[in-house]
Image (cartoon, helix red, strand yellow):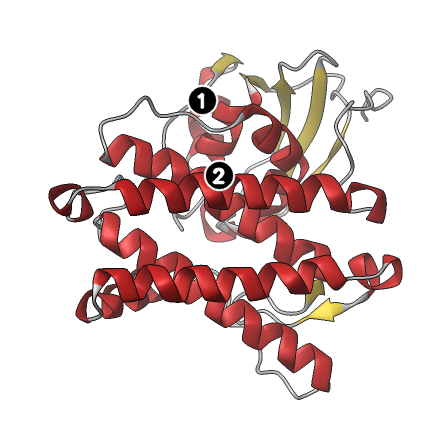
Amino acid sequence: MTTSPTAPTRVDATQFSGKDTMTRLIRQEYQTCFDMLVAASEQEWHAQTPCDLWEVRDMAGHLLDAAYCYLGYFKQAEHGWPTEEPRGMRPYADALGRSALQYRSVYRWEVLGRLEACTELLFSYFDRLTEDEWAGKLVPHRWVGPVPAFMMAAFQLMDYSVHNWDLRKALGQEAFVDHEASDTLVPFMFGLMQICFAPELAEGVDLSIDVHISTSADEHWTVQVRDGQLTYQPGKPENPDATFTFPCHEFCLDVYQRLQGGTASGDQPAIDTFRKLFFTI
């Protein structure tokens, strides 16, 4: 059982009322990213990022590849065309990692021109989504299957917010994730945690985890691992096996496995077991 949920103060971006906040943050994070890519020297263009396969130039290629795919997804949804079975997230990291490398053969400034053009068009799709479409329109996604349209926006905010941290690290800048963006993404990160859960590693595991997001609302979430499944809901479990406390930006980076953020307390075997239940994307 859990106690009554603590209502976070953030805007609920799954609702149409949160659309303006979501699209504003995506544009903000995109522009920050694009400006860093434009300003990078030729030496920095080839600098290694925290993503093993990618240099800075490959980050640009990945973001272009993602925007190009998303445009196709929206067109599929618009026409009501058939979609393939979702491929799942296991091959995601390797497939997208290698797709980005294909743009190494394209002139740097052409890559950036394509990125700007595709992104402007993609953002116009977000802008045109009506109240009914924001949560009611299903858009195909090659890896996770059909999702509500707002999830396409959330995926973009995840991409730009976390990859801005990657780029800052690669370019020798102070690395951080924007606070408002990371706070907005907190509920979506539990969904990503669920997507990256490896059930074969959870055989016989029964854990109740308190994830404490140290915002002004003193926010708690219950993550339950039982019968080879991971579930989550707002609220603090009554008797957690372990508690993980994060600032919201570290929670995002932890779920993306960029770093082991926050602090952990409680049963040490439970802490160690929980940390090992996820595959990398």
Q: Amino acid at mark 1?
A: Pro
Question: Is residue 91 visible from the viewing direction of this image?
Answer: no
Residue at 83% of width from left, 49% of height from top?
A: 16
* Residue under pointer 1: 269
Q: Is residue 11 above or below residue 245?
A: below
Q: Amino acid at mark 2?
A: Ser
Disc number placed over residue 175 in the picture, else none: none
Q: Is residue 101 above or below residue 178?
A: below
Residue at 43% of width from left, 22% of height from top?
A: 261
Secondary element at tag 1: helix
* Residue under pointer 2: 161
Residue at 24% of width from left, 53% of height from top?
A: 57
**Residue 176 position within the rendered picture, expressed as x and y whole percent measured from the top left:** 41, 25
Which quadrant of the rendered structure holds the N terminus?
Answer: top right
- Circle 1 packing at 10 Å, graded few (<14), some (14-19), many (20+), is few
Residue at 64% of width from left, 79% of height from top?
A: 75
- Whether pointer 1 and pointer 2 mark residues with C-beta atoms closer than 8 Å, the reply is no
Q: Is residue 112 above or below residue 243?
A: below
Secondary element at tag 2: helix
Give the foreground label among 1 and 2.
2
Label located before the other in sequence (1 or 2): 2
State how far apart marks 1 and 2 are (Cα). 32 Å
**Residue 265 position within the rendered picture, expressed as x and y whole percent measured from the top left:** 52, 11
- Circle 2 packing at 10 Å, graded few (<14), some (14-19), many (20+), is many
**Residue 268 position within the rendered picture, expressed as x and y whole percent measured from the top left:** 45, 16
On screen, residue 61 versus residue 185, left or right, reads: left
**Residue 277 position within the rendered picture, expressed as x and y whole percent measured from the top left:** 46, 41
Query: How many numbered circles does the render carry?
Result: 2
Question: Is residue 71 visible from the viewing direction of this image?
Answer: yes
